Image (cartoon, rainbow, N blue to C red):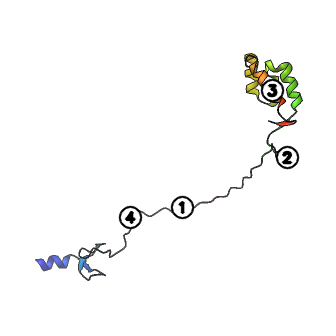
Amino acid sequence: MDQETQEKTKTKFCRHCGAKIPEDAVICTVCGRQVETVKSETAQPSVVINNSNTNTNVNQNVNAGGKHGIPKNKWVAVLLCLFLGVIGAHKFYEGKIGMGILYLFTAGLFGIGAVVDLIMLLSKPNPYYV
């Protein structure tokens, strides 16, 4: 019976040591070296990357001097802050609508914000960029 069992069991020879090993063996049971390459049951997906980015970055608020922002006249902002700073007119002039509304409802941050803004505006160059 031993011969019949051995004949029914399919075998192959190890490439490295020459020993008889089962046909489906990947590693030799005698020497322990790899006999065949390991086959993956699931195929790896093919990844295709098509990057066709044609966007161009154009900053519309860059001036000739390389300054970013919209130019504002210092003296217009100073006069608005001096006479109407409590209601935030200078903030609306600069385009800062949210701060203008805050100044409007808090009387220029209780007058302190308007005074601080007046000093800051006097220290800025003409024109300044917002």
> In the rendered structure, which amino acid carries the disc numbered 3?
Ile
Q: Earlier in the sequence, mark 4 or mark 1?
A: 4
- Res 47 label: 1
Q: CA distance from mark 4 to mark 1?
A: 18 Å
Q: CA distance from mark 2 to mark 4?
A: 64 Å
- Using the image, determine if residue 56 lies above or below residue 77: below
Q: CA distance from mark 1 to mark 3?
A: 60 Å
Q: Earlier in the sequence, mark 4 or mark 3?
A: 4
- Name the one closer to the observer, 105 or 56: 105
- The quadrant of the rendering that contains the N terminus is bottom left
Q: Indicate which label's residue lies in the foreground, 3 or 2.
A: 3
Q: Earlier in the sequence, mark 2 or mark 1?
A: 1
> In the rendered structure, which amino acid carries the disc numbered 1?
Val
| Residue annotated with mark 3 | 119
- Name the one closer to the observer, 121 or 50: 121
- Res 28 label: none
Q: CA distance from mark 4 to mark 3?
A: 75 Å
Give the structural element (helix, strand or loop) at label 1.
loop
Is residue 10 found left or right of 81 in the rendered image? left
Label 2 Cα crowd, 10 Å radius (few <14 / some 14-19 / many 20+): few
Q: Indicate which label's residue lies in the foreground, 1 or 3.
A: 3
- Name the one closer to the observer, 129 or 19: 129
| Residue annotated with mark 2 | 65
What segment carries the magenta color?
A: 48-58
Label 1 Cα crowd, 10 Å radius (few <14 / some 14-19 / many 20+): few
| Residue annotated with mark 4 | 41
Picture quadrant of residue 69: top right
Q: Indicate which label's residue lies in the foreground, 2 or 1.
A: 2
- Evaluate if marks 2 and 4 touch, with contact meaning CB atoms under 8 Å apart: no
- Evaluate if marks 1 and 3 touch, with contact meaning CB atoms under 8 Å apart: no
